[in-house]
Image (cartoon, rainbow, N blue to C red):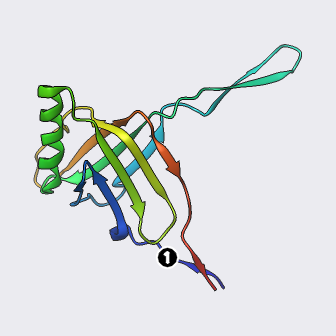
Amino acid sequence: MSLSTYDPSKVAVIIGGAIIEGFADGTFVNVERDEDSFSKITGVDGRTSRARTGNRAGKITITLQQTSPSNNILTGFVEEDEISSNAIKPILIKDGLGSTVIASGAGWVLKPANVEYGKEISNREWIIDCADLKMLVGGNPTFS
């Protein structure tokens, strides 16, 4: 028998030196590149070729509870960028029990999160655009 362990509380998200906390229940971080690493063309004769896109840009979506103090931090980054056009921040996401590491030296918050209120605590979804998204998608150690 083999056993691996994942603990969502061990996933660290650091943006511009600030530790992000107060994540929503469910999926709280989603990372994806803007396009595939290669594009493919197949001709009428069945010959296939591919071209490297070279695009390492991508987006990170972070979902926080409306009560998270990190909403203030991310709002501050948006305000800083709207005033100075210079709120480009380094980003690091690390699974503390696994080998997955996501990093970007140039990320910025696209816009303030949408706001909604209801009977229950709602979520705030923040989208971070990244010019150079580096992704080491790993696993978690297996114990036998």
Residue that appears at 26% across and 42% down: 126
Q: Position of residue 83 (x, y in %)?
A: 11, 27
Q: Going by the image, does 120 lie left or right of 11?
A: left
Q: Position of residue 124 (x, y in %)?
A: 21, 46
Quadrant where the image shows the N terminus: bottom right
Residue nearest the viewer, comparing 38 with 3: 38
The quadrant holding residue 137 is: bottom right
Residue that appears at 32% across and 39% down: 128
Residue nearest the viewer, comparing 13 with 42: 13
Q: Is residue 36 visible?
A: yes
Q: Going by the image, does 69 lie left or right of 136?
A: left
**Which residue is farthest top?**
44
Q: Position of residue 48 (x, y in %)?
A: 81, 24
- Residue type (three-letter) at the residue carrying disc 1: Thr
Quadrant where the image shows the C terminus: bottom right
Q: Identify the residue position indicated by label 1 in the image.
A: 5
Q: Residues within 10 Å of mark 1 (few under 14, many from 20)?
A: few
Vertical side of 46 occupied by 109: above or below? below
Q: Position of residue 85 (x, y in %)?
A: 20, 26
Q: Going by the image, does 47 lie left or right of 6?
A: right
Vertical side of 36 occupied by 18: above or below? below
Residue that appears at 13% across and 34% down: 80
The quadrant holding residue 129 is: top left
